[in-house]
Image: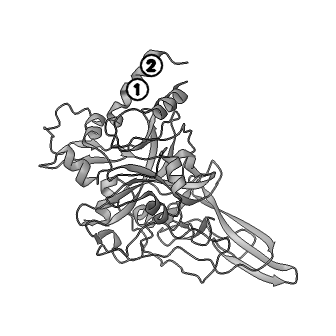
Amino acid sequence: MPSSTFFFFFLFSLFPYLSICKSTIEPCSVSDSCNAMVGYTLYTDLKVAEVASLFQIDPIALLTANAIDIAFPDVENHILPTRLFLKIPVLCSCSEGIRKSVSTHYKTRPSDTLSYIADTVFSSLVSADQIRNANGISDPSVLDVGRALLIPLPCTCFNSTDNSLPAVYLSYVVRSGDTVAGIAAQYSTTSSDIMTVNAMGSPTVKAGDIIAVPLPACASGFPRYAYDHRLIVANGSYAITASHCVQCSCGPGNLNLYCTPSSLAVSCSSMQCRGSNLILGNVTAQPTSAGCNVTSCTYGGYVNGTILTTLSTSLQPRCPASHQFPPLIAPPTVVSRDISFGPSPAPSPLEGGGTTTPKPSTPGAVTLPGLAPANGPSGSTSDGPLLVNPSSCNVNVLFLFLLVRLLV
């Protein structure tokens, strides 16, 4: 059992986060990470590449996470409108005993203040106090122009599952008029799931709260030695992996990961399944008196520059319908109530409808370094959530209980 001195030192180290009283905190004790998302509202008109640069992520990862068509001409220079809401993929780590993303840095500009950076530039995802403490700033009224500030963004992993099913967690800043039921409906989850994840005693949220929203997802389960081990894709979105050679999607028909060749890469290893004429993503169906013989060529991960494929054959009661892809949208130019980047509707037991094939995109489109969309969660150990309500800054009994569990 840790000494009482260590216990109180740990408590003290978390006060910069508790004093904000607006985020769900996930305690952690393992130095691992997972793929997560933060909900971001643009504070001004920004190019796709500028938004990606702000969070130090791959522009393609930004576009595919929001199901925006990467084949749109000069898509990285497309100007996105003010107040547009986007899901930003981030790497969620275990740092100082809690989950947070520490991959984002911001270079200060003339007239910047910590409050402006926190509330405006980063859409209230972080507080001025959190930035100050993360960077050891003694006098927040004096900021050197050009200083690179660490921006600790809220995130959660919860083992990348929700009710034992794959999930990607979105850190969502509650807006005026939001309700738990409305947020749940928007993201194809339930009010009870949101309440459980965030340790909420009642379905009540206030503007400025930051809650964790579980997004249903498709998980790969690739072997541990694969570069994209445990690739996970939120429902209704895409991811590019295997050195931009493979595009994987999730939903809307089911929560099975579906991967096909991508046109982004200049050079790729073979994507043909050995012993057949099928390439990655191909499916053939042959009706018989006993049912339907289905043969498919599926993606098995990216290992040492090689794209692994698997040929499988099965007898099914009926032949499957053409695969249905998540719908793609053109890069938005205006913000309207019709524009939504939430996941597709909850999947039905059977696929249906025709094929909606994503358009090919221009090779070599990525120009900025950042988070590789192939970096799947490596697994995490969590002791449970804490929702610190903005209306009360008291450390509640639940948090003390979780700390004891974490430290004992």
The residue nearer to you, when weighing 367 against 220, is 220
Residue 270, horizontal then vertical, whole percent: 62, 67
Quarter of the rendering occupied by the C terminus: top right
With 69 as the anchor, is 121 left or right in this view?
left
Q: What residue type is disc 2 on?
A: Phe
Which of the labelled discs sits on residue 6, or is there none?
Answer: 2
**Residue behind mark 1:** 11
Residue 379, horizontal then vertical, whole percent: 57, 44
Work out how far the residue at label 1 is from the one at label 2, CA to CA, in angstroms. 9 Å
- First in sequence: mark 1 vs mark 2: 2
Residue 292, horizontal then vertical, whole percent: 80, 79
Q: What residue type is disc 1 on?
A: Leu
Question: Of discs 1 and 2, which sits in the foreground?
Answer: 1
Judging from the image, the colouring scheme is one colour
- What residue is rendered at 55% in x and 67% in y? 249
Hey, which quadrant is residue 382 in on the image?
top right
